Amino acid sequence: MHRRNFFKKHFSKLELQSGIYICRQCHSGIHRFYDEMTLAKHYYTLQRLLDDEQLASFFRWVAKQKVRV
Protein backbone atom coordinates (compact mmCIF):
# COMPACT_ATOMS: atom_id res chain seq x y z
CA MET A 1 0.00 0.00 0.00
CA HIS A 2 2.70 2.46 1.01
CA ARG A 3 4.39 2.42 -2.37
CA ARG A 4 1.26 3.37 -4.29
CA ASN A 5 1.09 6.93 -5.61
CA PHE A 6 -2.28 7.66 -3.97
CA PHE A 7 -0.80 7.15 -0.52
CA LYS A 8 2.44 8.98 -1.29
CA LYS A 9 0.38 12.02 -2.36
CA HIS A 10 -2.10 12.02 0.53
CA PHE A 11 -0.01 10.92 3.53
CA SER A 12 3.36 11.93 4.95
CA LYS A 13 6.11 9.35 5.52
CA LEU A 14 5.49 9.58 9.24
CA GLU A 15 1.80 8.84 8.77
CA LEU A 16 2.59 5.88 6.51
CA GLN A 17 4.98 4.43 9.08
CA SER A 18 2.67 4.79 12.07
CA GLY A 19 0.54 1.92 13.27
CA ILE A 20 -1.51 0.68 16.18
CA TYR A 21 -1.08 -2.32 18.45
CA ILE A 22 -4.07 -4.65 18.57
CA CYS A 23 -4.60 -8.26 19.54
CA ARG A 24 -4.61 -11.03 16.93
CA GLN A 25 -8.36 -11.57 17.31
CA CYS A 26 -9.14 -7.90 16.58
CA HIS A 27 -6.68 -7.86 13.68
CA SER A 28 -8.32 -10.88 12.09
CA GLY A 29 -11.77 -9.41 12.67
CA ILE A 30 -10.87 -6.11 11.03
CA HIS A 31 -9.71 -7.95 7.90
CA ARG A 32 -12.85 -10.08 7.95
CA PHE A 33 -14.95 -6.93 7.52
CA TYR A 34 -12.74 -4.86 5.19
CA ASP A 35 -10.06 -5.46 2.57
CA GLU A 36 -6.67 -3.78 2.80
CA MET A 37 -7.44 -1.02 0.29
CA THR A 38 -10.60 0.03 2.14
CA LEU A 39 -8.70 0.04 5.43
CA ALA A 40 -5.88 2.09 3.95
CA LYS A 41 -8.16 4.70 2.40
CA HIS A 42 -10.88 5.03 5.04
CA TYR A 43 -9.88 3.40 8.34
CA TYR A 44 -6.29 4.54 8.77
CA THR A 45 -6.51 5.61 12.44
CA LEU A 46 -7.63 3.89 15.61
CA GLN A 47 -10.42 6.43 16.06
CA ARG A 48 -11.81 5.74 12.58
CA LEU A 49 -11.83 2.01 13.33
CA LEU A 50 -13.63 2.59 16.62
CA ASP A 51 -16.18 4.90 14.98
CA ASP A 52 -17.31 2.15 12.59
CA GLU A 53 -20.40 0.51 14.10
CA GLN A 54 -19.69 -2.99 12.75
CA LEU A 55 -16.15 -2.97 14.09
CA ALA A 56 -17.16 -1.39 17.40
CA SER A 57 -19.70 -4.16 17.91
CA PHE A 58 -17.05 -6.77 17.10
CA PHE A 59 -14.55 -5.14 19.50
CA ARG A 60 -17.15 -5.20 22.29
CA TRP A 61 -17.65 -8.91 21.66
CA VAL A 62 -13.88 -9.59 21.66
CA ALA A 63 -13.50 -7.70 24.96
CA LYS A 64 -15.91 -10.17 26.61
CA GLN A 65 -13.95 -13.25 25.51
CA LYS A 66 -11.62 -15.11 27.86
CA VAL A 67 -7.91 -14.86 27.10
CA ARG A 68 -6.40 -18.22 26.20
CA VAL A 69 -2.77 -18.84 27.02
Image (spheres, rainbow, N blue to C red):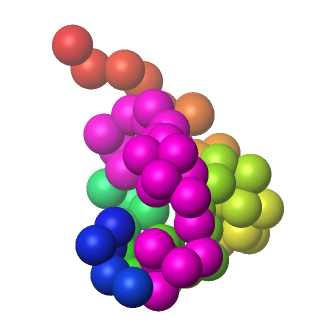
Q: Quadrant of residue 67?
A: top left
Q: In which quarter of the image is the N terminus?
A: bottom left
Residue 7 shows up from this direction: yes
Which residue occupies 60% across, 76% down? 10
Q: Residue at x 74, y 69 (%)?
A: 53
Q: Which residue lies furthest to the left in this view?
A: 69
At a point 52% along the width and 45% down the height, the residue shown is 14
One can see residue 35 in this view: no
Residue 1 covered by magenta stretch: no
Q: In the image, residue 8 lies at what x, y percent?
A: 45, 74
Residue 19 percent coordinates (x, y): 47, 42
The answer to whether residue 36 is above or below residue 27 is below
31 and 12: which one is in front? 12
Q: Is the magenta stretch mostly helix, strand or loop?
A: helix
Number of marks: 0
Please say if 20 is above or below 45: above
Position of residue 36 in the picture relative to residue 54 (left or right): left
Q: Where is residue 47 in the image (x, y as percent from the top left)?
A: 74, 51
Give the magenta range: 6-27
Give the quadrant of the C terminus. Answer: top left
Residue 29 horizontal side relative to residue 41, left or right: left
Vertical side of 66 occupied by 48: above or below: below
Given residues 6 and 41, the one toward you in this image is: 6
Place of residue 16 in the rendered image (x, y in percent of width and height, measured from the top left): 46, 55
Asked where in the image residue 22 lies, by quadrant, the reply is top left
Say which quarter of the image contains residue 4. bottom left
